[in-house]
Every structure is written in structure tokens, then in C-alpha cells.
Amino acid sequence: MKKASLWLALLSILFAVLPIASVITAGVLASVFGCGLSEGDASTCTTPLGDIGELLYFMAVFGWFVFFTIPIGLIGLLIAVILFIVGLVAGRRKAPQTPPQS
């Protein structure tokens, strides 16, 4: 159960910060290619791969999901901590008690 709680904690943290990573990536890409980035409207951003203005706009607006993902991620993290504690307590109860050596 300890391993499952660790995976749940990692996935909860990843889920919570994914919109923040999207906004940071959009900002970095816009800066690298010298494009404007606004949440109001998509702007043209010409790169060697083509126009990525719509993609950057979507990535920037995706950051608003942080108002949902942070609370859900915190709930998942809380559940993971509870599962970890339950796993520790259950592991101690299952451990055989060795009698003291005299």
C-alpha cells in the first residue's frame, strides 16, 4: 500500500501543476520565437514549423484550469498520505513480535 500511495502522491502533484507548466512553456516558446502572448486573443507566431499562435493561446488559457487542478491534486495528496499512514500502521501490526532474549 505504501508504493500505491507514493504513486498517487506523484500523480496528484503532476496533475496539480500541469496547467502551470503549460503556461510557463507557452511563455518560453513565445519569448524564444519573439511572439506576443495574450489570453485575450491568439496572435500570429510564425516559426520554421508554421504558425503556432493558436497553440500558444490554448496553452496560455489552459492555465485557468489551475483553479480546479490544485484543489483536486491536494485532495489526492491527502488521500495518498492517509493511505501511507494506514500502510505503516498495518505493517507494524503484521510484523511478528519476537520475544525478548534472556
Image (tube, rainbow, N blue to C red):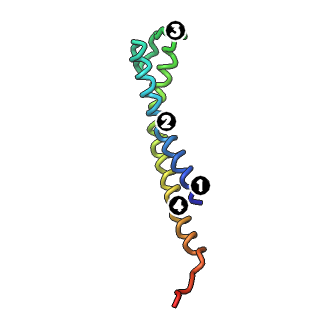
- Foreground disc of the pair 2, 3: 3
SS assignment at label 3: loop
Mark 2–mark 1 CB contact (< 8 Å): no
Residue 32: x %, y % from top left: 41, 16
Q: Quadrant of residue 38?
A: top left
Which tag, 1 or 3, sits closer to the chain's start?
A: 1
Nearer to us: label 2 or label 4? 4
Residue 25 vertical placement versus 34 (above, below): below
Cα distance in 3D space between marks 2 and 3? 27 Å
Going by the numbered disc 2, the residue's amino acid type is Leu
Give, as a three-letter code, the residue at label 4. Answer: Phe
Q: How far from the left and from the top, in percent, is residue 3? A: 58, 55
Q: Which residue is mark 2?
A: 18
CA gap, disc 1 and disc 3: 44 Å
Q: Nearer the viewer, mark 2 or mark 1?
A: 1
Disc 1 on helix, strand or loop?
helix
Give the residue number, with chain letter if any, for mark 4: 84
Query: Where residue 37 sits: x, y (%)?
Result: 40, 18
Compare marks 2 and 3 and give the one earlier in the sequence. 2
**Disc 3 packing (10 Å; few <14; some 14–19; many ≥20):** few
* Towards the viewer: 67 or 84: 84
Which amino acid type is marked by label 3? Pro
- The answer to whether marks 2 and 4 mark residues whose Cβ atoms lie closer than 8 Å is no
- Is 41 located above or below residue 68 in the figure? above
Bin the neighbour count of mark 1 within 10 Å (Cα to Cα): few under 14, some 14-19, many 20 and up: few
User: Circle 1 is placed at which residue position?
Assistant: 4
The label number, if any, that marks residue 48 in the structure image: 3
- The crowding category of the residue bearing disc 2, from other C-alpha atoms within 10 Å (few below 14, some 14 to 19, many at least 20), is some
Answer with mark 4 or mark 1, whichever residue precedes in sequence. 1
**Rendered image quadrant of residue 95:** bottom right
